[in-house]
Image (cartoon, rainbow, N blue to C red):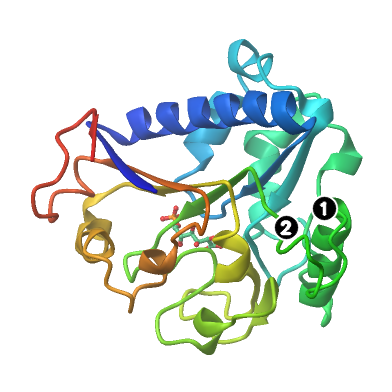
Amino acid sequence: MREVLAFATADDVADAAAFLFVNLAAQAVRDRGAFYVALAGGATHLSCYRLLSAPLISSRVDWEKTQVFFGDERCVPEGHPDRNDDAAAAALLNHVSLPGKNIHRIPATERDGAERYESEIRGAFSIFSPSSDKGIPRFDLVFLGMGPDGHTASLFPGRASLDEAQRLVLRVDDSPKPPVSRVTFTLPLVNAARHVSLLVTGKEKAAALARVLLEDAALPAARVRPTAGTLTILADAAAVSDSKNPPAAGTSR
Ligand code: 6PG
């Protein structure tokens, strides 16, 4: 299922994303005893992460039962300004009572970092083999951003990684958005999620979002279609401005 929620401003999008996180976390802990979430990189999500770090909101999340992963990471050392995990830590993870063992950073500077991270994900879900009858690990929430070219995570238009059908995590060395090397979730892992939330704000992304809403499969973000889950696109008015019959701000379609 796909829903598109349009909001007047980027701050409203961040609000909606934060409450989606809180609600899905409560539901996952109630239903399955744990909440598995993959955070997005880039700047759009940082406002949402900062909101989640506010005690009034963070106190509603059972962080002891929350397992935090990352949908992609740049192949630069920890502490480098380009690291997605460090940005999420500064905005959120360092400010909540999340045990260190619950934070699963990608070993992105290791040559076999993708293989190791895939093993770590499989271990966390006790689904150790691709042939397991348990299928693919199902995150409760995968946060994604989108670039002006329609990329998401570190899956870029026209790249072979977009067509990966087996592996759950890949290293790519052909990113047009620097840095060139990254480790990323693949579409099979993203689309196995119970809920994917794609955050898109800003006029510079309006053309790509219009194509995504028309399901233009040339764009990686248009290929995010959870097999048995929900995709929620949270966008501001600037980002939906090129879309035909866009949902009015504050509504869904
Ligand atoms: C990355 C991100 C990437 C990001 C989009 C949007 O590591 O670069 O995972 O997919 O989410 O490029 O970035 P902004 O939110 O900064 O526009």
Residue 197 visible within the image: no
- Residue 112: name its quadrant: bottom right
Secondary structure at badge 2 equals loop
Residue at figure coordinates x 19%, y 48% from the top left: 240
Earlier sequence position, callout 2 versus callout 1: 1
- Residue bearing mark 1: 125
Q: Residue at x 63, y 58 (%)?
A: 71
- Where residue 132 appears, as percent x and y from the top left, is 82, 68
Q: Secondary structure at mark 1?
A: helix
Q: Which residue is mark 2?
A: 137
Kindly tell me whether mark 1's CB lies below 8 Å from ligand 1.
no
Q: Taking the image as drawn, is residue 177 in sight?
A: yes
Residue 51 appears at what percent x and percent y? Answer: 53, 25
- State which quadrant residue 136 falls in: bottom right
Circle 2/circle 1 CB separation < 8 Å: yes
Total numbered badges shown on the rendered structure: 2
Specify the amino acid type for callout 2. Answer: Pro
